[in-house]
Amino acid sequence: MRTRAALMRAAQALIAEGRTAVPILEITQAADVGMGSFYNPFETKEQLYQAAVEDALDVHGALLDELTTGLDDPAQVFRLTGRLHRRHPELSKVLLHHGFALAASDGGLAPRARRDIEAAVRAGRSTVQDTELALITVAGTALGLGHLLHRQPERDDAATTDQVTEDLLRMLGLTAAEAHDVCGRPLPDLETTTTGPHPAA
């Protein structure tokens, strides 16, 4: 298990750097494990990368679940997600490198976004008619926001995330006043999360 975790951490670092076309030897060196150890938990490099992405999705989902415990407003999940790009940059970049494929994933933000969109429609808080189209809109916004925050490190991530969330909520059917009110509410302290910053840890 320690070898598997070390290999996944190394793979996640390579994915975050956009360097996946590297030999297995380089991965094992980065993980500080023997070359032969690679083939105990994994058969191929592709299998390792798949496991590394799935692990990142699980950690992202766990972070969101921990942060949103006790929150009854789904919109706060998006505000928190935007802030996580800066708090957990490597995790963020792993997810961003897999782009829109994550919108159909069973882990991470996608199932939570779908659940929250459907709940908002049932509660009369959203005018969305097609959940899948709304999910694509949310996913595209989340990915675009992440790329922007990484490209412009001087930009205030909290203010930018709240502005994007406010615009997104209006698009999903809230009034301008409702969207502004939602984005002005206090959020949980991101620094108090118990989930570690290293996805494979």
Image (cartoon, rainbow, N blue to C red):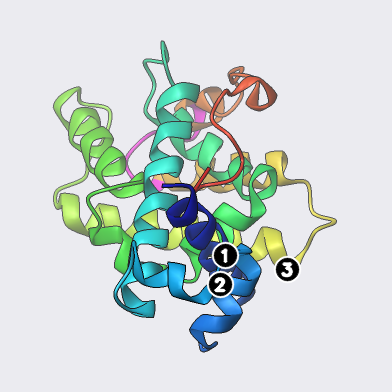
Q: Nearer the viewer, mark 3 or mark 2?
A: 2
Please tell me which residue is depicted at 34% across the width and 78% down the height of the picture: 46
Please tell me which residue is depicted at 36% across the width and 46% down the height of the picture: 108
User: Disc 2 residue type?
Assistant: Thr
Is 175 within the magenta? yes
- Give how far apart the Cα atoms at labels 1 and 2 are: 5 Å
Q: Is residue 108 above or below residue 7?
A: above
175 on left or right of 121: right
Is 138 within the magenta? no
Which segment is the magenta one?
171-177
Q: Which residue is labeled 3 in the image?
A: 151
84 on left or right of 142: right
Q: Which residue is labeled 1 in the image?
A: 33
Quadrant of residue 27 in the image?
Answer: bottom right
Q: Earlier in the sequence, mark 3 or mark 2?
A: 2
Where residue 137 sits: x, y (%)?
35, 58
Q: Residues within 10 Å of mark 2 (few under 14, many from 20)?
A: many
Where residue 201 sits: x, y (%)?
53, 42
Quadrant of residue 38 in the image?
Answer: bottom left
Q: Which residue is labeled 2 in the image?
A: 28
Q: Nearer the viewer, residue 106 or 30?
A: 30
User: Disc 1 residue type?
Assistant: Val
Please tell me which residue is depicted at 14% across the width and 48% down the height of the picture: 129
Mark 1 and mark 2 residues within 8 Å of each other at the beta carbon: yes
Mark 1 and mark 3 residues within 8 Å of each other at the beta carbon: no
Look at the numbered disc 3 and give the secondary structure of its residue.
Answer: helix
Look at the numbered disc 2 and give the secondary structure of its residue.
Answer: helix
Q: Which label belongs to residue 116?
A: none
